[in-house]
Image (cartoon, grey):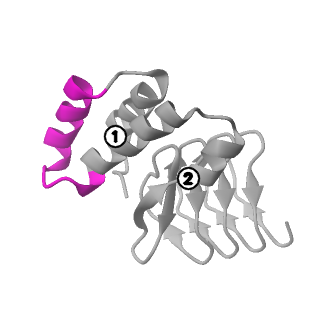
Amino acid sequence: MACTHIAHDCIVGNNVIMANIATLGGHVEIGDWCNIGGGAMIHQFVKIGRQSLIGGGFSAKQDVPPFIIGAGIPLRFVGINKTGLERRKFSEEVRALIKKTYRTYFKSKLNRGDALKKIKNEISQIDEVKEIVSFIESSSRGII
């Protein structure tokens, strides 16, 4: 949309929507089917996983995993991108496993390392869950 900015060496996936004045710093990677809200700023070297949504006016300084909504100051997990997943025809079962994965990672009282171990050991390892785990493990900036 109007006045968006994509800096040098960015990788922007397919079907990404960047609303007015959304800004990407250098070397940012945005996965397919992401939505970046108006006025959102993405710090250099940040990665945004596919099917994620960043709320308007917020700033991402750390990596945002796939399939979630990020909002707030500082940016934090506020839920899965249920509407986006439904539009892309993710099944109810897959959406439930994604939600369970993120509830374990972000909302349990476990530290993030232990939560990741629990996800690997106890949640069905469908492709989407594997993608989430891989994204988190490969993050160099940390996860929101």
**Any part of residue 139 in sight:** yes
Which quadrant would residue 57 be assigned to in this image?
bottom right
Near-viewer residue (8 or 136): 136
* Overall secondary structure of the magenta section: helix
**SS of the residue under disc 2:** loop
Q: Secondary structure at mark 1?
A: helix
Residue 116 in magenta? Answer: yes
**Few, some or many C-alpha atoms within 10 Å of disc 1 (few <14, some 14-19, many ≥20)?**
many
Q: Earlier in the sequence, mark 1 or mark 2?
A: 2
Q: Position of residue 71 (x, y in %)?
A: 49, 70
User: Is 47 on the left-hand or right-hand side of 139?
Assistant: right
Residue at 51% x, 59% y is 69
Quadrant of the drawing holding the C terminus = bottom left
Q: Residue beneath label 1, please?
A: 101
Give the magenta-colored segment's residue range.
106-123
Q: Quadrant of residue 77?
A: bottom left
Magenta segment includes 140: no
Judge whether 4 appears above or below 48 on screen.
below
Give the percent coordinates (x, y) of residue 13.
Answer: 71, 40
Q: Are marks 1 and 2 in contact (CB under 8 Å)?
A: no
Task: Give percent across and percent down for residue 76.
Answer: 39, 65
Residue 47 falls left or right of residue 144: right
Picture disc at residue 81: 2
* Amino acid at pointer 2: Asn
* Count of residue discs: 2
